[in-house]
Image (cartoon, helix red, strand yellow):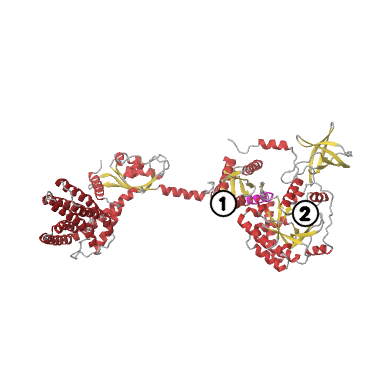
Amino acid sequence: MANPAVRGERRAARASAGSRAVPAADGAEANAVSAESAAVPATSPFAGFARWRTRSDAGDCLHYFVSRRWMLMAPVMLVCAGLMGLVSRTLPDIASAFCVAAGMALALAGGSLARIERGIAPEGWQRYPLLGVAVVMPMALFGSGTARWTNLHPGLGWEITANVFVIVVLLATALLESRLTSIIAATIGLWGGAAVQQGSVTSILLLTIGGIIGLLVAIRQAGSVATQSLDHAEREREQRRAEQLLHEYEQTGQGWFWETDRQGRVTYVTESIAALLGGSAAELAGQPFTGMFRLAAGGQQGERTLVFHLNTRSSFQDLGVRAATNEAEERWWSISGRPVLDQFNNFMGFRGSGTDLTEKRRSQAHVTQLARFDSLTKLANRFQMSEWLEKILTSPRIETRACAVFLLDLDRFKQVNDTMGHPAGDALLKQVAERLNSTVGDRGRVGRLGGDEFQVILHGVQNREGLAHLARRIIENLSQPYTIEGARVVIGASVGIALCPDDGMTADALIRNADLALYAAKGGGRGRHHFYDEDLHSDAKERQQLEQDLRDAIANGALELHYQPQVRTTSEAITGFEALLRWNHPVHGYISPAKFVPVAEETGLVAQIGEWALRTACADLATWPEEVRVAVNVSPLQFANAALPAIVTSAIAAAGIAPSRLELEITESVFLGDDKTTETMFSALKNLGVRLALDDFGTGYSSLGYLKKAPFDKIKIDQSFVRGATIQGSRNGAIISSIVSLAEALGMETTAEGVETMDELDLVRMLGCSHVQGFIYERPLSAQGVTAKLADGLVAVAKGPRSARASRQTMLRKVVLEHGPHSYDGTIRNISQSGAMIEGLWNVPVGTTFGVHLSEGYVVMAQTRWCKEDRMGLEFAQSLELDDAGAVLFSAARARRERADNTPLRRTA
């Protein structure tokens, strides 16, 4: 049973709070006014006059003359005038009606005038004229109008009018809310208006005396109660503030109060908390206090100790418990309580408070999410993946430390960011994460390390063939088209793989080795997977040394420019030279640009090398004949540099050459950037007067839209289209013809690169290429070699083999050869798309036909072209297919397709 004294105190407090509750704005206004009132000395004879108030508006009656409710005086006047007319059955004349209406209008403006008065300082003299306009004048006009009406109509006697005046004064007293000054002013105004209308000097004199007396009474009364009013107002203000703070604290739901009886039943709980629990405070009364929470048997420590404290009747503080609400999301509270004892130390129950822990727990969960998960893809982040890998590698049992680490890098992802924007890139990363998660499934854990890098950790002993199969599935799935913002996007992926314990026993070693394997996969052409090999360490060291040597070469001026002539097909005259970068390493000799240029691009040295090449080529060009041009390659990094036009201008001016003799070769990759910036750069370069050539056409950016705006003078056909163009069945010739037609339609020249044989030269000449560049005319020459070449004239002579021989692979592979009903064993020593050299058969006649079993179920017909001792050369009746690396495939296309179709893309349950 609850303590009656406790319940009495609580109910009294609630009743007190309810009876004194006021709007927050009025409470704030009361506080400000009380502070102002306190500043006035209490000993002043006018200490409380026109300032004292005990509550908002009505409470400080002598501070404000005009009440906000004074506007209700207008309908009072209207009703009273109506009563006079109804009782006397008369109507006022125009002047009387005007006076009454004017009084009503001024009274109706009482609310606005009251607001104006509250903006005037307490000492302001403007408040007194405002009192006259708001209170005195309406009453005077009403009194004057009704007095005139009474005088004009004998049927309306003064006994009626006087009673009406009494009613008006009483209602005015009620509306003015005990404002003694205003009540006296209203009374004098009413009777004064009537007295003026009557014109009685005696009446006016008596009213004046009465007004003075009333004013003295008001001053005396205000002075006597000023001090008491201030004290009362201060106490009431503090009490109201405490009640409001308590009420607001409960209303926020962040804090609340509760009380139980000695049996642990609820006797009080904050109403808002009761609503969260699906009921009201009255409905919860008498229910077990523990029923407000979900106290699972295996719950948290806070839940178990709550029951313990209630049973042992001991104080507790900040216990976290889960609320028994019906909300979809969990709600948690922190509760504190202490036992309540009566004067005889008898236990009466518990009393305490609670606060909401939900947002705090959500915040903690969010912090944990940010610390351990990637915010974009919701995959594990680098920290969690590293933690998980470290946990595997530090397992107590050695056999459980086996694992495999995949590092993935997306190919062409940067192009998506550059062309479609980062929001599209983020959307793409989300889809990649979903596909990667789906492909790996429950075999391992997937995480995002940052950017377009992902990691997969597979726990347990792994088979390399199984890992290779999974890597291929990952690459294949991630390479399928994506739909981003309605556009079709295709990217790729490269995978590096390291295993524990084979490739390392620590997390750092595994990650480093997987990264080296990933670098090797990307270096091998991307879209591949690569297992870690010890040779990769030496490759990485070699690359690091190559970078350092390249920096030294730039600093010491060890780079060279060689020049390959560009020849007009119709006249075989040299029209220009392409500047090609060469590096004669002091130890390794000449190093291929394909090896050191990527290093320069990755390290940012390509801009410095490019500027040097541009200035050197222009300086060499100055010593050559005027009709000869020089072509210099411009990397995408150089093209993106806003200072490129200034660099070109400086190089031309330093060499003293005509701008038209300089040709800048630009690759298609520059069009992957900002269109406006690209167009601006093209315009700036073209305004310099230099020529522009589109290099490696058809091997990069797949759109032809840029040709509409880019002011190219020449299109260079990549050597990959020239190679093999003369082979029967090749489509390269049709591609070259299309490029030439396109260039002619756009008014551009064409240069076929990499022409090495006479039949290739004849083909590109027949297809209409305007220029040729390749070994068929000359290999790249040094600057001195160019000078010597030009000394003999500008005519170039084609020298080279009639046709190209297909590239061959050296190998030892056992095959079976069928000739009629006989079968023979042979060994392939080398093979190409068109033929093979096989040993094992002696003195085979030329023209003999064989069926060569390259693999099970794959037979290729071939004919002998030569034979010497036990070796013979065979020409295949149909060219073999090559894989992505250019190696011959030893399986039929149909069989490969069937195997590909039967290979599942995703694991199924």
Q: Which mark is residue 770?
A: 2
| Image quadrant containing the C terminus | top right
Q: Nearer the viewer, residue 14 or 428?
A: 428
Helix or strand or loop: what does disc 1 sit on? helix
Q: Amino acid at mark 1?
A: His
Q: Position of residue 829 (x, y in %)?
A: 81, 43
Residue 351 location (% of width, % of height): 30, 46
Compared to 850, does 29 lie above or below?
below
Residue at the disc numbered 1:
422
Q: Position of residue 176 (x, y in %)?
A: 21, 54
Are dots 2 and 1 in contact, CB under 8 Å?
Answer: no
> Which quadrant is home to the N terminus?
top left
The image quadrant that residue 211 belongs to is: bottom left
Instruction: Tell me where residue 49 appears, x and y as whole percent.
Output: 20, 61
Residue 660 visible here: yes
Q: Quadrant of residue 572?
A: bottom right
Residue 423 drawn in magenta: no
Decide which of 348, 248 is in the foreground and name it: 248
Residue 392 visible in rendering: no
Which one is earlier in the sequence, the residue at label 2 or at label 1? 1
SS under mark 2: loop
Magenta: predominant secondary structure element? helix
Numbered mark located on residue 366 in the image = none
Q: CA distance from mark 2 to mark 1?
A: 42 Å
The magenta segment: 514-525
Q: Circle 2: is it few (<14), some (14-19), or many (20+) Cα within 10 Å?
A: many
